[in-house]
Structure formats: C-alpha cells, structure tokens
Amino acid sequence: MLTQITVLLVLLALGLFLASLLALRSYTRFAKKARGPVTRALPVAKGPRTRLDALLDPLIAANGGQNGLANILDHKQAFAARTHAARMAGRSLDLIYYIWATDTSGWLLLSELLAAADRGVRVRLLLDDVNVQGFDLAFLGLNQHPNVEVRLFNPVLNRGHRLRRMVEFGLGLSRFNRRMHGKVWITDGRVALLGGRNIGDTYFGAPGSGARLSHDADMVLAGPLVQSVEQVFDTYWNMGLSLPILTLWKSFRISMARYRRRVARHIHTPLALHYQAEALARHSAESLLIAPLRFTPDVTLLADPPEKAIGKRKGPWLLDRIETLLSTARTEVLLTTPYFVPGRPGLAILTDLAARGVTVRVLTNSLATTDLFTVHAAYRSYRLPLVAAGAALFEFAPPKGLRRKRALLHSKIFVVDGEQALVGSHNFDLRSAYINIELGLLFREPALVAELRALFDMQTQPANAFSVTMANGRLHWNVVEDGREGREKAEPEASVFRRMASGLIARLPHDWF
C-alpha cells in the first residue's frame, strides 16, 4: 500500500513538474511575441527647455556639476512632491511602482499623469502586476491616451478568470515570485524621487480608504546621476518581462471621454479636494524639489540588474553592496526595515559587527503593527541570537493616541558610522536580497545623514517602540506608556490569534519568506 502511494506521489510530482515546464514554455513564447517596442529616455539636451531645465542648470553649474539630494520624510510632502513633479513636467515622466492603489491619492496622481499627457508630455508607467490585478481598467483607460504607455512586470496572462489565474499562478510559482519592488518617479530626466513609498493613501496620509499610515522615506535626486536612473529605467522597461498592458486583454475599448469622467468623479469629491488642497497649501515645487537640495560629490545609484528577475547573477546585486556597506562599519550601524528576515549571512554580518564592538541598532515592526505577520513569524528566530550578540533591537509601536493599530513602519534606511546612508526599496529580508528587483541611493552628505539618524533616534524612543532585551535566556519587551513602565514576556498588544498564528508559522521553514 505504501509503495503504491509513493508511486502515485512521484507520478503526481512528475506531472506537476512537466506541467510547470509546459506553462513556462508557453508563457515565454507569448512574452516574446507580446513585447512592446524598445523606447529610450528622451534626451535632455534636445527639444524645448522645460521649467526644471531653467531652474536646475544654473544651480548645478554653481555647484560644480555635483548631484543634489534632499530627504522627504513627511507623508503629505511626499504626495505634494509627486504632484509638483508631474505639473512641472514638460518633456517626460518615467515611473516604476510596486503598488499603485486606486484610492484617493492614487486617483489624484493618475489625474496628474493624464494632465501631463494632455500637455504633450510622454508618460511611461511600469507597474508590478501582482498588485494591479483587479484594477486593470484604471490603467487600461490611462493607456488609451496617445502619449501614455503602461507596462506590467511579470504579468499573469489570465486576467478575468479566477480559476484559470490560480492554475497559472500555481504552475508558475517560481516565476511569479519574482517582483519589481523598486519605486522611482523621474521628471524630464532632471529630477528623480526614489525610496520606499508606493502610491496609495497609506503612504501619503490621505483619508477615505481606511488605510493605516505607513511611515516611510524618499529622496529627491537632481543632477547628472538622474541620467543613470533613466538608463536603469530603460533596462527594466525594455526587458522581456515588462509587457504592454494591452497585450494582456484580447479586446478592450473605452473612450477617453468616458475615462476622463471616471477620473473626475474620483478627484472632485470633497474628501479628495480637501486633502489635495491641504497637502499642496504649504509646499511649492521649488520648496520641495529645488530649495532643499544639498549638493555632494559622493552619491551612488544602487540598482539590481534586470537578469535578477530570472535568477541569474552575471554581476553584483544590490545585496552585495549592502553587505559591503555593513561589513566596513567602524562604530555604528542603524538599520530600519519593516520586514527583517536577514537569513544566516545577514545575521552573521550583524552579530560579527556587534562582536567587534560596533554599535548595532535595528528597528522593525512589532507583531501588533506589522501588515505581514507571516513574515514577522519568520523574523522571530533571529531575535534571540541578535540580542544575545549585543545588538539593540526595537519594534515599532507608536503611541495609543496615534491609534497604534493604524500605523506601520515601511521605510528602508541604513545609516553607517553617522557618515553615509542608503535609502531605497530594499528590505533587510530574503525576498529583497534574492528575488525582488530593488533600487536605492547610497550617499555621504552630513546634514542629510544626520537627519536620518535623528529620525531613527525619534522612532526608537520608548513612546514609539518596544525595546527587546534578554534576561535568563528569554526575550522581554520593555513597554512605556501612559507614564507606566514594565517588561512583558509576550509580544505586547498583539491579539491572541496573531500570537498563536505567528508561533505556528515560525515552526515552518522560512528561507522562502
């Protein structure tokens, strides 16, 4: 009987393997036929000068051709910066996002892309498909504009049939697991916004969707390095896994007039108008994108190569640069990451640093605040060895007055020796390390690094985070609230269900998280 069951299981596994190979072959053939035409960033030197050209050329020249940088840490400023970046566009908008939600802020920014396209601006929008499914019509409508092209990264072919989509996903799990996680907004090839923010109310503090507030970080980049950002965009845009959205729909027709009416309904609600007015009231384009720039010769764009999307390692990945950055630390490492699953190599780097006397401080989400408690379960096994090695561990938990369950840490920031910092989309977890495509900026600029260090100090204050310590071989969470201090042996403020589910999931192999 056991032999028969074993044979059946082997045959089933073989059948699934062959079906997966056939599905991959079929998808590969489709993708080759469906690829859109190769397009490149529009040259900055050609065509009429734009407003950004006029503002930036003398400023960059006065600073010796260096690159300008600025932090964007406030959520409403982040929304306003993107709005103004779209309104200033006179030549091109090139955007990559992992998530573009069709909520209040999402529709407002879609309307800005539409308005830019109406002015003659060429718009290229690359979205990761995993978070577009179900919202295709919003982007198909935008794609109808002659100056707009929308492409989806690594898309599912079966858009409208749930069962077929589930079968396709199951047979191609290894392929669909690879995602475009980078976030970048490029205007006229002159200004780029990079960081951890997706497009959605949770990232901009917009009301109406019930989304929790995600604390995040972006950077403004202006200068010669923006051309390198454009080149990276082009490699992602023209790779075989980025397919025009129209190739995924056998038939689609919608008039632009009808689409415009739909956009207008969303952006002219009292809620949307009030939020937009409030976000833009105190922030002009110059005050967000030009005036704060601090110029430095020491800034590097870190970007995963496109072949990472198919698991090939022809050159260094962003992970390699992060490992080098951390391993060269002399005095201090401050690490902010919403999802902390370092794997054995990452844990070894951090514990070795602590053993060398380097101050290691890590901030991540608590079980009470995380939006992915399955990933938090994988993180559990790293806490004890990290704390035992002498590292300081903090779990984000803002005060109850700010509705703790409605707040989330989402920024990805590395600060080393108080001298250099990395801000981008790369979590310190295995997905970002080995599967997703990520982007970031590594730089040295004293004032900006100090600002990020001050942010870390503020977010790890007792009012904003639980410090995790160890006594007698057990972890304790140090809680300070309402004037009360105490130590708890269980993860504070997490529901019983979350604690139980997290404990069960933590027993599973977690290398795939």
Image: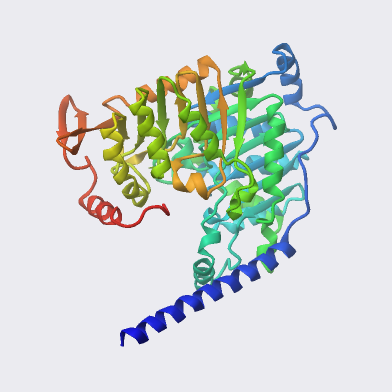
Observer-nearest of 506 and 137? 506
The single residue placed furthest to the right in the displayed view is 47
Quadrant of the snapshot with the N terminus? bottom left
Residue 445, image x, y percentages: 55, 17
Residue 136, image x, y percentages: 59, 58
Observer-nearest of 242 and 159? 242
Q: Is residue 315 visible?
A: yes
Q: How is the image coloured?
A: rainbow
Q: Which residue is drawn at 69% across and 52% down?
A: 239
Q: Judge left or right: residue 192 versus residue 425.
A: right
Work out whether 317 lies above or below 391: below
Work out whether 377 lies above or below 361: below
Observer-nearest of 440 and 143? 440
Q: Judge left or right: residue 238 versus residue 7.
A: right
Q: Which residue is drawn at 64% across and 67% down?
A: 27
Report the number of numbered marks: 0
Q: Residue at x 28, y 55 (%)?
A: 507
Q: Judge left or right: residue 164 versus residue 66.
A: left
Could you say which quadrant of the image residue 338 lies in? top left
Residue 61, image x, y percentages: 74, 15
Could you say which quadrant of the image residue 409 lies in? top left
The single residue placed furthest to the top in the displayed view is 62
Q: Can residue 397 be seen in this view?
A: no
Residue 127, image x, y percentages: 60, 50
Could you say which quadrant of the image residue 294 lies in? top right
Observer-nearest of 403 and 7? 7
